[in-house]
């Protein structure tokens, strides 16, 4: 039975990924870390990779190192694309931040559809995407349409279906942007049907896969994706502020020109001439000097994902979120919680979201009193994740048991105010 701890222990015993947890640095074995969808844990291999880079390359080679560092965003992108995106080489760069990459590709797509004046996203999309689109719309005089998927009855768990999106599409639309996995509810949008639909209306669909990369299979090439962005610090385990990635399918690379024409996208970069002439291929989408330390963090973490295989990772995310839902049914429904994530594994990723009127206080109390780390998202969601490589099933089980006890005893009401503005 799922309510027996033995149940979780037996899932761990049969878990083909069970060996990976010991490859992460875990300083507090009593902590239940259920926030790998926000920041992944530190791989031990990253500690040595960064140290070796600093002493063996930066110190030893100084500026001469650039001869082999200069194009490193590309092979690291190929690795990330192969391990997690289903992308053939030459279509992914690891660079900059998700926000910058999102701005770059959104504008490139809009400029490739001259005369079209409408751009679309959804109300539940991650704030940075909505704010950047708002800025672009103001700057270019475009009409930003926000799909309502938050008010009751508008969508199931914020999920955008082709039926919902179709009503907004017409020949004035240049760009639609959506998350693969919604950051708050954990709803998974279907990549292929939505991409096909938007393309049939002559527009681009820019995917933000930040909450999906390293948790589910996405098969970008096979699903016909044109453009996408995402981060590496969540299920990618590459560290706080690690470089993000962008994907541009070869089919559309020549058609798209990013607005920031940095020197790394200049064809003859070291000719340093007066005229910008864009490099062919994915380098034409790079702005500037890559963070080599950051790239090494991405390389070591995504090498682990490649070794584990994204299909095994996705299976564990599916089974782990199912265990969470079963524990919710058994323990939490009667304590005022609601489930904000789909019961269908194909419609979710690595995290679930539970609603509770006291969600904010419960989250702080879990950290202060119970050594359980979830996170809170306004207005009333608690997000709980299984990051398949560093998290065991029993860690999730223990976290849920502690949450049940904390709420049943009302101990969480005694919590002190948080001392950080980060939730
Ligand atoms: C879906 C999504 N997009 C974009 C971002 C912002 O990323 P960055 O701060 O790296 O630009 C985040 C951050 O969590 C995110 O979850």
Image (tube, helix red, strand yellow):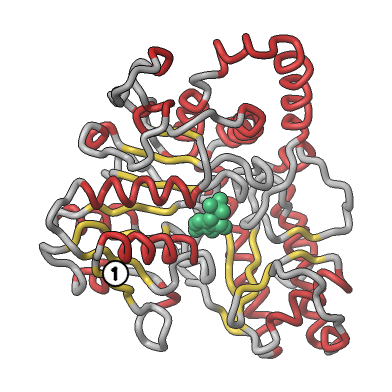
Name the residue at 64% across, 49% down: 388
Quarter in which the C terminus is drawn: bottom right
Please, is residue 94 above or below residue 338 in the view? above
Q: Nearer the viewer, residue 7 or 176?
A: 176
Q: Does residue 389 appear left or right of residue 30 in this picture?
A: left
Q: Is mark 1 within 8 Å of ligand 1?
A: no
Q: Does residue 376 appear left or right of residue 56 in this picture?
A: left
Please, is residue 370 above or below residue 412 in the view? above
Name the residue at 86% across, 81% down: 416
Q: Position of residue 223 (x, y in %)?
A: 29, 45
Q: Does residue 78 appear left or right of residue 203 in this picture?
A: right
Name the residue at 36% across, 35% down: 261
For label 1, the SS is strand
Q: Does residue 49 appear left or right of residue 299 in this picture?
A: right
Q: In which quadrant of the rendered view does residue 42 lie?
A: top right
Within-10-Å neighbours for mark 1: few <14, some 14–19, many 20+: many
Quarter in which the N terminus is drawn: bottom right
């Amino acid at each position: 039975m799922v309510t027996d701890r033995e149940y979780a222990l037996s899932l761990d015993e049969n878990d083909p990924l069970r060996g990976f947890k010991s490859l992460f640095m875990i300083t507090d074995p009593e902590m239940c870390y259920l926030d790998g969808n926000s920041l992944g844990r530190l791989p031990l291999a990253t500690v040595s990779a960064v140290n070796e880079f600093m002493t063996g390359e930066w110190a030893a080679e100084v500026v001469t190192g650039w001869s082999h560092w200069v194009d490193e965003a590309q092979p690291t992108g190929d690795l990330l694309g192969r391990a997690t995106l289903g992308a053939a080489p030459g279509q992914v760069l690891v660079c900059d931040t998700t926000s910058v990459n999102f701005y770059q590709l959104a504008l490139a797509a809009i400029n490739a559809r001259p005369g079209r004046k409408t751009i679309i996203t959804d109300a539940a999309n991650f704030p940075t995407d909505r704010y950047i689109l708002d800025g672009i719309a103001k700057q270019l005089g475009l009409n930003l349409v926000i799909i309502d998927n938050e008010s009751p009855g508008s969508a199931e768990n914020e999920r955008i279906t082709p039926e919902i999106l179709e009503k907004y599409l017409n020949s004035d639309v240049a760009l639609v942007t959506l998350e693969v996995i919604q950051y708050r509810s954990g709803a998974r949008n279907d990549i292929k049907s939505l991409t096909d639909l938007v393309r049939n209306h002559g527009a681009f669909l820019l995917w933000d896969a930040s909450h999906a990369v390293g948790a589910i299979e996405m098969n970008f090439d096979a699903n016909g994706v044109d453009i996408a962005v995402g981060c590496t610090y969540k299920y990618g385990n590459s560290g706080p502020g690690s470089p993000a990635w962008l994907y541009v399918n070869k089919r559309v690379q020549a058609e798209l020109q990013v607005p920031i024409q940095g020197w790394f996208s200049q064809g003859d970069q070291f000719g340093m001439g007066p005229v910008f002439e864009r490099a062919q291929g994915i380098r034409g989408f790079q702005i500037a000097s890559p963070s080599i330390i950051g790239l090494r963090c991405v390389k070591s973490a995504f090498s682990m994902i490649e070794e584990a295989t994204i299909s095994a990772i996705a299976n564990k995310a599916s089974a782990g979120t199912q265990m969470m839902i079963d524990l919710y049914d058994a323990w939490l429904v009667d304590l005022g919680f609601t489930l904000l994530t789909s019961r269908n594994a194909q419609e979710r990723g690595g995290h679930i979201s539970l609603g509770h009127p006291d969600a904010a206080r419960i989250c702080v109390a879990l950290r202060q009193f119970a050594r359980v780390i979830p996170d809170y998202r306004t207005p009333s969601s608690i997000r709980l994740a299984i990051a398949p490589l560093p998290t065991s099933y029993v860690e999730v089980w223990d976290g849920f048991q502690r949450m049940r006890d904390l709420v049943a005893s009302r101990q969480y009401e005694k919590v002190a105010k948080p001392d950080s503005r980060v939730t």
